[in-house]
Image (cartoon, helix red, strand yellow):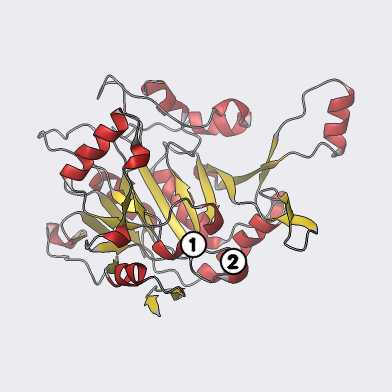
Amino acid sequence: MVVVNNEHREVEYKGDDPAIKNALERVKPITLEEADWSVDDGRYGVIDGFIAVVDGRDDLDGALQQARELIQQADFEVVTVIRQSTSLEKTKDKISDLFWNAAFGQKAIVRPDRTTGLGSAKQGTVLLDPDHNNFYIKSPSSSFTTLNMVRSMLGRDVPAFNYKKTGFFSGGPDLGKDFKTIFGAAGRAFPEYMSVYMSHGASTSEPGVMHFDSGYVVKDSVTDGGLQSRSNSDLPHKFIEAANTREFDPLPGGVTVTASIVGGGSIVRKTDTARYDEYKEHERNRDLAKHKAYFQDGDDIGYQGQDGDIMIMRNDRWPDDEHGNSRLPSDHCSTIINAYGNHGNHLGRMVGLMSSQVCYMSPQVHEQVEL
């Protein structure tokens, strides 16, 4: 049995595939100890030349602001902010409840014995208003609430979703200390993204398949481009008003910000330019499905983020930097054993994700990006 060491828990692979066992032995943890701190007066560490490591244990906001600067440097495809939290177990339990109860919605399932029941949600969305420490759970609206029944009788539209503010005084569910700490700070450092997409293991597609995330581009940087994100038209007015008060210069390209609560962070490897060029060719020909690269099939060394730490991975289609250096995207994959671990009621890997594909984007970004 191969065990991937994790600062907060051990994640086991209980299968017998020799390729996966071999691959797990090639995965190294991204930690403070693994980094070389001799560069830039020790302001940050470097792993294998392409991963920047920032110490976020004492000043998480400052560390994420530094990460925002570092991800714009051509050398760094990934920046990882280390937290070393000791309270993830409590946050994991609270977010597990959100998946299993009606906070994120449920769906009917048919069990093997042909009885019916309710299954957990696979994804959920939390809106971020970090300046006011407000977090809103987006959950399916019930047609049977008193308010919605009155709306229906009056011939008014019944909203598809409700947005319930979390916290004791608001009557909403508790997200846990770590969630608010991680994504409150991430929302302040990366105001491009106004929400977090929560996902558990059953909803992760293709664990171990290396890929590059698509991203937006600012108008002045490149002429062709687009923004794939959710429409802001259904968001609460006060939430949008709060977002509009923020002033910032959007990054010249998108990033993916992830933090695993349990089950391990993403696995990253240094981007090979030949593989990336081939990837772009497949993308232009609309046959990316043929461009599958499985981490367990190669012999590359991979590096994996630890639970509770924050990974910032550069997306595709960034413009070159001011010196003409290519800013390559991060070649990464979901943890290999995501589909194979035995995790019980906590639903396997549990991860929060911020990217232009799954998040509500700031109105300022919509204005500056080719739609």
Q: Can residue 244 be seen by looking at this rendering? A: yes
Report which residue position mark 2 lands on. 346
In x, y percent, where is residue 121?
A: 64, 51
Q: Position of residue 172 (x, y in %)?
A: 70, 51
Which of the 4 image quarters holds residue 99?
A: bottom right
Secondary structure beneath label 1: helix
Give the alpha-carbon distance from disc 1 to disc 2, as whole Å.
Answer: 13 Å
Residue 251 appears in which quarter of the rendering?
A: top left
Q: Is 259 rendered above or below residue 363?
A: below
| Image position of 111 with respect to 249: above or below | below
**Kind of element beneath mark 2:** helix
Residue 134 image point, x, y percent: 58, 45
Tell me the amino acid under the disc marked 1: Ala
| Front position among marks 1 and 2 | 1
Q: Earlier in the sequence, mark 1 or mark 2?
A: 1
Task: Give the residue at the far bottom of this rendering.
Answer: 1
Q: Which mark is residue 339?
A: 1
Residue 282, how many percent across, how many down? 28, 34
From the viewer's side, name the closer residue of 272 and 48: 272
Residue at the image position 18 percent from the left and 48 percent from the top = 272
Residue 361, label in figure: none
Look at label 2 and name its amino acid: His
